[in-house]
Image (cartoon, rainbow, N blue to C red):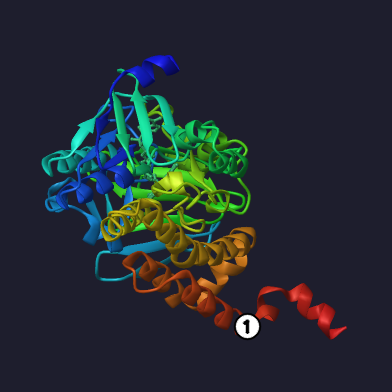
Amino acid sequence: MSADATISQSPIKVEAIVIGLGPAGATAVRLLSEAGVQVAGFDRSSFPRSKTCGGGVSARSAPFLPKGWDLLPHEVTTGVSLSYLDYDPVEVEMDRPIAYQFHREEFDLFLVEKAKAAGAQVFTDRTMANLLWNGASFRLTTSRSEVFESPVLIGADGATSQVYRFLGNSGKEQSKRIRKKRSVQHGYPSSEKILKCERPSRRSDVLIDLGSVPGGYGWSFPKSGTGNNVGVVGFAKPLENPLGTLKVFIEKLLGNSLPSEDGQKSSTWLIPDYQESTVHGIIPGLFFIGDAGGMVDPFLGEGIYYAMLSAKKSVSEILMHRWNPGKASQSYAEWAVRDIFRDFSQARRLATIIYRFPGIYFRLVQKYPHILSMYAMILCGSHDYRSFSRTIGKNLFNLPFRKFFPRFQSNRLV
Ligand SMILES: Cc1cc2nc3c(=O)[nH]c(=O)nc-3n(C[C@H](O)[C@H](O)[C@H](O)COP(=O)(O)OP(=O)(O)OC[C@H]3O[C@@H](n4cnc5c(N)ncnc54)[C@H](O)[C@@H]3O)c2cc1C
């Protein structure tokens, strides 16, 4: 598509354009449409489409889900099992849901269907042919030559956002700042697959393993019908070979019962690093939500909750400042830094310490299992990373270090 063809076609004017219809984009489209905003949502895939993800949706996400979500096939997680090497796992049971285990294909299709049902214009199977900002509005040309124009643009196109790339080339001063800030896509490579697996032993638990992934953790989430979603991520040390690390983790998980060939494919994708997402508030009327905005916590790797939370926040700001998109995007950017990234920086600090020294953390949790309950309570929304860190800090000093580190003890005695 040439630039001339883009300009010659008269655009369809809407009040908001959303690019990407994962949990972030589909939620934003639905909420805008429910509020009476004329919105057009686009995705390069047609739904259902696969998405590399563990599919664990924390209990605190439930208020953001449209009616009928509980009818989707899912398992309810009420406990956590933390394992480390050959030690007995530490298990906590919360006696209430802490997460829901979905299949992402079904979950994402459901969210897109709900956005359509709310009356939004939804266009799938389209890529961006061009995206320009003229100082007052955004003009999108799709791969099918449709042209849309709007003063509000929501970038919800995931960890490798193309919206950055297009707007970075727009030629305006702000666009150059985007290009400078996000010249390299940075994130944590992560890998997962579906596997028949007996661990965790209770289907209402999630298994988090600290011993098999250097600088990170491995997980096993029971799924309804198909087996478990097992995966690996390195937060203190990005994985160089995520597929290889996944293979090692699976070998440790299954031990002797390792199937020679199970037919399920492993997939790899990036979990974005929020620190690289300093693009919020640069262009008036532009919002980056979900993975495109770096909204994934760097301790658990939880992104679905933040995708929907950031969608809701961006929509609230758009509705509150309906005639001033610049003010809306500025206010959204301030929220992201103040309410989200501050907690993420605490999460990142924890990740650096815990995943570098998993043995110490495991022993701490063995002695004080309520630390694992707090971890579960983060997923319920009743604790944040600041209170979690304080509890770890307080209990760490009570650890009988001498018992755990006899050499340290003897040095001190000499
Ligand atoms: C291995 C792995 C495991 C994970 N496990 C969990 C978990 O258990 N729980 C959890 O909460 N989070 C998990 N996450 C994170 C979670 O998957 C993401 O945070 C979440 O999907 C973000 O939603 P989103 O809508 O921002 O982006 P996405 O879900 O990535 O959706 C982006 C959408 O944009 C579309 N798109 C992309 N480019 C374009 C384009 N140029 N034009 C149009 N459309 C485009 C894509 O087709 C896609 O539909 C995991 C991530 C990985 C990699």
Give above or below for 21 relative to 5. Answer: below
Quadrant of image for the N terminus:
top left
Q: Which residue is pictured at 59% across the width and 64% down the height?
A: 349
Give above or below for 128 relative to 107. Answer: above
Badge 1 amino acid = Phe
Outermost right residue: 414
> Where in the figure is residue 42, as x and y percent of width and height?
29, 32
Q: Is residue 138 left or right of residue 277?
A: left
* Quadrant of the rendered image containing residue 17: top left
Q: Judge by depth and name the residue closer to the eye, 400 or 170.
A: 170
Residue 225 appears in view: no
Quadrant of image for the C terminus:
bottom right
Q: Which residue is pictured at 22% across the width and 49% down the height?
A: 32
Q: Which residue is pictured at 22% across the width and 37% down the height?
A: 109
Count the numbered circles shown.
1
Disc 1 C-beta below 8 A from ligand 1: no
* Quadrant of the rendered image containing residue 60: bottom left
Where's ligand 1: which quadrant? top left
Q: Judge by depth and name the residue closer to the eye, 42 or 273.
A: 42
> Where in the figure is residue 399, as x and y percent of width and height?
61, 81
Q: Is residue 390 left or right of residue 120?
A: right
> Where in the figure is residue 144, as x and y percent of width and height?
30, 18
Judging from the image, what secondary structure is the residue with disc 1 in?
A: loop
Q: Report which residue position mark 1 lands on.
A: 397
Residue 87 appears in view: yes
Q: Judge by depth and name the residue closer to the eye, 408 or 393.
A: 393
Q: Is residue 345 left or right of residue 404?
A: left
